[in-house]
Amino acid sequence: MAKRQIIMEIRWRRRREKTVGILYRFLPAISSIALVIFYIWAFMACSQESAAPPPLPQDPATGRVHIQIANMGGQRTVYPDIGGFVKFTLTFTGEDGKSAPDVVLERETSTEITLEPGNWNITATGWVNGVDSELTAAVYGNAKVLVIAGRVTKANILLDKPTMEEGMEGMFEWRIRFPKDMVETATMIISALGGDGTFSIPIDALNLFEKSEGGMSLPSGYYRVDVALSTHYEESGRTEIVYIYSGLATVLPDMEFTADDFPLYSEAEDSILEISIGIKKEDEMDIRGLPDEPVILSGIDAMDFPRELHLTATGFASIECLVDGKQVVSTTSNAEGDAIFTIDSRELRDGRHFLSFIGMKNGVPHGRDVPLTVTSLNNEVNSVESLAQALAALPPNSLKKPYPIKMSGVNLSGKGNSGNTLKSLYDTLETAGRYVALDLSGSEGGTFVNISLKTAPGKRYIASIILPLSITVIDTNAFSGCATLVSAEMPGVLTIQQGAFDECENLESVLLPEATGIINTTTSGHGAFYKCVKLTSVYAPKVGIIDHRSFYGCASLIDISLPSATQIGEYAFKDCTNLVNVATPQTAVIADNAFAGSGFVFN
């Protein structure tokens, strides 16, 4: 037993010595690892300390307010450059009559103070060296804050209100350049804001031929400046809102008019108008509806195309919108008090314009000036290739806003896949994806051929169509299933084959001044205008033959005059449920069931 204990003790000592040896061998590595862990811990602790929130006030019963006077200098004529002030004062008014000592900032624009918890109104005033270097309060701004015990609250104060004490004045400076050899009259009218919230107090009217640049002293306050120039042919102008600050100079942004502002008269109506509006993101008036891309307006009345651009000024219940200094746009207000104005392209000539917005918000006038360019786009093309180029330059549109296109040079009887054929025309429309009102009166062909909608899906982009006089026949199913087609003018067509406008569900009007026959050579096939459910107007004074099922299911047709009719076939007007009046010669041969299921009773 004793021998066994001795052996176990020897083994234990050997293990201990081996373990100690291993520790001594790896001690440097262990020390390095420990040192790395220590450095990582120290770095994280420092990072957490640097990222910690601002220290809380020492007094837990108070809160702190970090005040920043906003720098809005350089924005048009509204806000002064903050660098022009010699000092700022901060005053504090709390609820329940609370007050705090005023704070003076010597050119600094931020500070942090301690206040009691509650609601506070903080007023910042900017001071300048006035007459005889006497300190003068020029401008002020307000901020309302809720102070919470133990927390830091931020308050940004915008100096946006001029002091208007009696006798306090500032400088107004301007420079206006224009082609004096072209312009016949040039005036600048300055008006002050009246107590009724309008600029109804005239201050001065200057002849810019005599004083196109200069300055004048004005009492502090709000002013409207209208610049009006005219030549023998055209007028142009700009409108600005300016703030005059005590002891400071307000400089009107340089106005430069060129010959481009006074083009010879150009008629923009009956064409597409591209209105390109330049947007200044930093301007203080928020105008919603100004797109980054040009807006397409149309001046065509007959097709009821869109010609209006709708804009909204947020929160402005009273506003004027002027083009070239003239109020030529309508203004309304919505339930939220926003001002909504509409620009009508018929009021605009081609060329450069100036779009100005003048509005009142919370009793303070605001202004915004936006450059605007109107260009009449050429909507006449003479090939499928030029059509592709024209449509590629236009933004996507809807069926209710098709682009009017006058197109010549297309062979409307051609089914080929290349060149100026009808098939190529359809393919171009499919590629462009733009809805069009097609005037093909300058194109050619004898028969308007059928190319199925499945083969030529581009047909679905045609909202209306005018055919040339040379087209005398509309082929079978030529427009079958064209659900987008609203109107069709066919001045030279003599014959319309069966199914030509089959199920054109939006077709409303058809003009056939020379047609003599609406034909259906099948025994049971669909007629030419089968189930055109919105068709209300058919002008066909020379049509003699109206074959069977020609107007089957035209549920919106109320009356139709067929003064030359000689034959009306079976079911020609079946299920025309609203048809109440049909005018035909007494000699016309009419099938007994021609008006079956319709509202018209034939005797």
Image: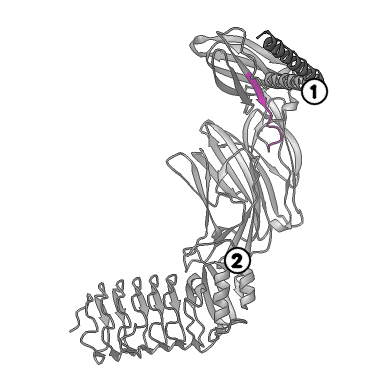
Percent position of residue 235, x then y = 65, 55
Q: Residue at x 58, y 23 (%)?
A: 143
Residue closer to the observer: 292 or 255: 292
Residue closer to the observer: 576 or 304: 576
Percent position of residue 8, x then y = 69, 13
Q: In which quarter of the image is the N terminus?
A: top right
Q: Which amino acid does label 1 sit on?
A: Ala
Q: Name the residue under label 1.
A: 29
Residue 358 visible (yes or no): yes
Percent position of residue 561, x then y = 31, 81
Labels 1 and 2: the sequence-earlier one = 1
Q: Mark 2 points at which residue?
A: 267
Q: Residue furthest left?
A: 603
Q: Which residue is drawn at 57% across and 35% down?
A: 365
Would you place residue 7 above or below residue 74 in this image? Answer: above
Q: Which colour scheme is used?
A: one colour
Q: Give the foreground label among 1 and 2.
A: 1
Q: In which quarter of the image is the C terminus?
A: bottom left
Residue range of the region highlighted in magenta in the rendering: 66-76
How many numbered circles are shown?
2
Please tell me whether mark 1 sits on a helix, a strand or a loop: helix
Q: Which residue is drawn at 68% across and 37% down?
A: 75
How many angstroms separate mark 1 from mark 2 (CA)?
90 Å
Proximity of marks 1 and 2: CB atoms separated by less than 8 Å:
no
Picture quadrant where residue 60 is located: top right
Residue closer to the observer: 382 or 448: 448
Would you place residue 459 above or below residue 181 in this image? Answer: below
Q: Horizontal placement of 245 versus 334: left or right?
A: right
Residue closer to the observer: 372 or 135: 372
Please tell me whether mark 2 sits on a helix, a strand or a loop: loop
Say whether residue 9 is magenta.
Answer: no
Q: Which amino acid does label 2 sit on?
A: Glu
